Amino acid sequence: MLEPVEKIFEKKYLTKEDIINLLNTSGKERLSLFQKAKDVKSSILGKKVYFRGLIEYSNYCKKNCYYCGIRAGNSRYSRYRMTDDEVLEAVKYAYINEYASIVIQSGEQTNKAFISKIESLLRRIHQRTGGNIHVTLSLGEQTEETYLRWFDAGAHRYLLRIEVSNPGLYLKLHPNNQLHGYNRRLDALASLRKTGYQVGTGVMIGLPFQTVSDLADDLIFFRQLDIDMAGMGPYIEHVDTPLYKYRDELLPLKNRFELSLKMVAILRIMMQNINIAATTAMQTIDPQGREKALMVGANVIMPNLTPVKYRQDYLLYENKPCLDEEAEECKSCLEARIHMAGDEIGYGEWGDSKHYSNRTL
């Protein structure tokens, strides 16, 4: 640590060196970082935590990313697609329980039938709820035309994780072809911004070949992109992926978790009014992972509304928690976690990004 954290906190603009220093904190300085992030969250956003009911719509995916369990090349999963009735039943649960927001997530598909199906579902969701449920989509790279169709049908937010902002590292995590190109991902993020979405992205923390310098660059990337929301979490290996062969070279899980908390805390300090999710991957490593993320700056949490029968087949990484919890069990568990973290649930509130509201005035 070249400079005391208190001096760093006095700055309005963190440099890469500042961020690296904060990522390397330990002991009292690490606790000071966490306290600063908690104070920023409380003063700027209050104590509200917003639910996003998660619907894992399908595990069909045309991509072959080297880190993902549902990659096209993994033949060990049964592929599924939720029915319209199953999706609308999950939406009904969210509506009745005043979640106010849902996330529809899926493996990446770009065929006409998929695009039309999502558009139809969005219109039906809007109709069934009187427009009172806000929808976040996380459906991968699409054309600008598709993004516009979904936006016009009622989607409000879109999460497209960059996973790593270093182009060289990106190449090590994806097949070297046009379908998986780094610039393709950047173009998609630009299209989302142009279309009018609240734009979210995120990264994995503790990947093979990744350095602290890379993580600092990730945070700077978020700031430069001027994102509205972020979802970050520790990289957790999956046995059916090419990256699994590097498992013995990875940071211990505890270290990946600690780095993830620091990333959340630093991002909260850097971009004070964006939405930051407490991701499920954190709970995979630490039973109290999500509440710990809330205590260092996160303000969004995603109860799983996917029918239990599908959850074993939507494993992006191993040891994912809550696979056998019905929606009501998941809700009760997360309510307790949020209260343990000293926060309260913003029931009936969309919880839109304040950053988005400010930049679109």
Image: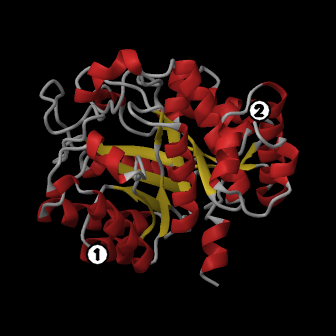
Residue 316 visible, this orientation: yes
What percent of the width, then of the height, locates residue 56?
A: 35, 43
User: Residue at image x 29%, y 57%?
Assistant: 182
| Badge 2 element | helix
User: Badge 1 is on which residue?
Assistant: 144
Count up the numbered dots: 2
**Earlier-in-chain disc, 1 versus 2:** 2
Residue 354 vertical position relative to residue 361 in the rendered view, above or below: above
The amino acid type found where label 2 is placed reads Arg
Q: Quadrant of the N terminus?
A: top right
Q: Residue furthest front?
A: 2
Q: Are marks 1 and 2 in contact (CB under 8 Å)?
A: no
The amino acid type found where label 1 is placed reads Glu
What percent of the width, then of the height, locates residue 108?
A: 24, 51
User: Badge 2 is on which residue?
Assistant: 30
| Badge 1 element | helix
Q: What is the number of the mark on residue 357?
A: none
- Residue 42 lies left or right of residue 100; in this view the side is right
Q: Quadrant of residue 344?
A: top right
- Residue 94 lies left or right of residue 333; in this view the side is left
Q: Residue furthest bottom?
A: 361
